[in-house]
Image (cartoon, rainbow, N blue to C red):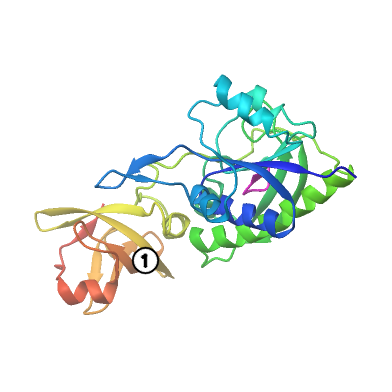
């Protein structure tokens, strides 16, 4: 059995949970690499990554390279004398980095590979109406999420579950997967399975404004899946036209009511406390949303302070 000296690489909250689990299982983390600080928000204040915040609280050795091929960074990384690197939600590594440790570099990915390779696997699994997903550990190679699989863990997706809830469950499942992977590597018992590529493999495309926009030509179920797959971040959105006013509205939560109707698709139907949008195959009851210049609020709160005419429609 070889004692592990680990360098951890990650940036968002998802990675924090995994790093915390590694430390709580008494593994030695000799260094942590995370994204460089960058300005964010309206005030453009410098924002630390979630991983950096954790590292500062736990007094771990921190590296924040802007260039992963920089000679000074590579020298410092080598000086840590790690024999294993663990990557969770970071960036593509150059070969000189992932080949550096004796025992290799493995990644935790939030999908059942080879499906949903890419930047947003949790979101796309829900958007596409999947009923199961999971996490996979694999040794990194020269492409994105294509390396030899060490192990995977599966979990069902509930029809009412959103991306935020699934994120948290997969983070916990990922903690178990990483711990088991570390045990196998430490004992020299890790075996791998080569990923088979297929034209039917599904991709986790990077999210942008265009693919987060609601398309009302799609079915009610497809729209419902988009809303929960993008909630709470970055959120689905649509344009609401009321008389001559157009508003880009973020929709965070909705309930799907399947029924036959004769309403125009996109028509808004309101009461004092409810807002429904007519869709193919039924109605979406919007329960949480955000109009421009307002905070996110539930529908009853919104309708208490503003009125929507019976001519309003969503596009």
Report helix, strand or loop for mark 1: strand
Most extreme residue toward the top is 71
Residue at the spot 38% in from the left edge and 59% down from the top edge: 280
**Depth order, front residue of 144/273:** 144
Any magenta on residue 287? no
Measured along the vertical axis of the image, is residue 288 above or below residue 222? Answer: below
Which residue range is magenta in the image? 108-113
Quarter the N terminus occupies: top right
* x then y, percent, for residue 190: 85, 43
**Depth order, front residue of 181/50:** 50
**Would residue 170 be found to the left or right of residue 284 on screen?**
right
**Would you say residue 262 is visible in this rendering?**
no
Measured along the vertical axis of the image, is residue 292 above or below residue 273? Answer: above
Figure quadrant of residue 240? bottom left
* x then y, percent, for residue 83: 77, 36
Figure quadrant of residue 78? top right
* x then y, percent, for residue 134: 66, 54
Measured along the vertical axis of the image, is residue 120 above or below residue 69? Answer: below
Any magenta on residue 109? yes
**Dominant secondary structure (helix, strand or loop) of the stretch shown in magenta:** loop
**Would residue 118 be found to the left or right of residue 295 on screen?**
right
Measured along the vertical axis of the image, is residue 304 above or below residue 157? Answer: below
* x then y, percent, for residue 141: 70, 28
**Would residue 218 be found to the left or right of residue 91 on screen?**
left
Residue at the spot 41% in from the left edge and 63% down from the top edge: 281
**Would you say residue 19 is visible in this rendering?**
yes
Q: Which residue is mark 1?
A: 284
**Depth order, front residue of 262/202:** 202
Residue at the spot 53% in from the left edge and 54% down from the top edge: 54
Figure quadrant of residue 157? bottom right
Most extreme residue toward the left is 244
């Amino acid at each position: 059995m070889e004692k592990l000296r680990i360098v951890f690489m990650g940036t968002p909250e998802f990675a924090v949970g995994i790093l915390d689990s590694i430390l709580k299982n008494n593994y030695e983390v000799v260094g942590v690499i995370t994204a460089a600080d960058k300005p964010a928000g309206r005030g453009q204040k410098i924002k630390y990554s979630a991983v950096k915040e954790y590292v500062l609280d736990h007094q771990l050795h921190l590296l924040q390279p802007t260039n992963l091929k920089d000679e000074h960074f590579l020298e410092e990384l080598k000086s840590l004398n790690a024999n294993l690197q663990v990557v969770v939600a970071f960036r593509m590594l150059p070969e000189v980095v992932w080949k550096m440790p004796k025992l290799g570099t493995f990644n935790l990915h939030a999908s059942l590979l080879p499906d949903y390779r890419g930047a947003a696997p949790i979101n796309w699994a829900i958007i596409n109406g999947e009923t199961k997903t999971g996490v996979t550990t694999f040794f990194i190679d020269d492409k994105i999420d294509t390396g030899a699989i060490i192990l995977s863990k599966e979990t069902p997706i509930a029809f009412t579950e959103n991306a935020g809830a699934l994120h948290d469950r997969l983070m916990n499942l990922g903690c178990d997967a990483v711990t088991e992977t570390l045990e196998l590597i430490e004992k020299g018992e890790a075996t791998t399975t080569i990923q088979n590529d297929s034209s039917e493999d599904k991709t986790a495309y990077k999210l942008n404004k265009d693919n987060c926009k609601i398309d009302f030509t799609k079915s009610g179920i497809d729209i419902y899946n988009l809303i929960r797959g993008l909630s709470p971040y970055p959120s689905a959105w649509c344009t609401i036209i009321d008389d001559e006013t157009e508003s880009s509205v973020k929709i965070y939560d909705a309930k799907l009511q399947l029924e036959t109707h004769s309403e125009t698709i996109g028509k808004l139907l309101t009461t004092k406390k409810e807002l429904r949008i007519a869709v193919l195959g039924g109605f979406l009851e919007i329960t949480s949303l955000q109009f421009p210049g307002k905070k996110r609020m539930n529908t009853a709160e919104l309708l208490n302070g503003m009125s929507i005419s019976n001519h309003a429609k969503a596009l």
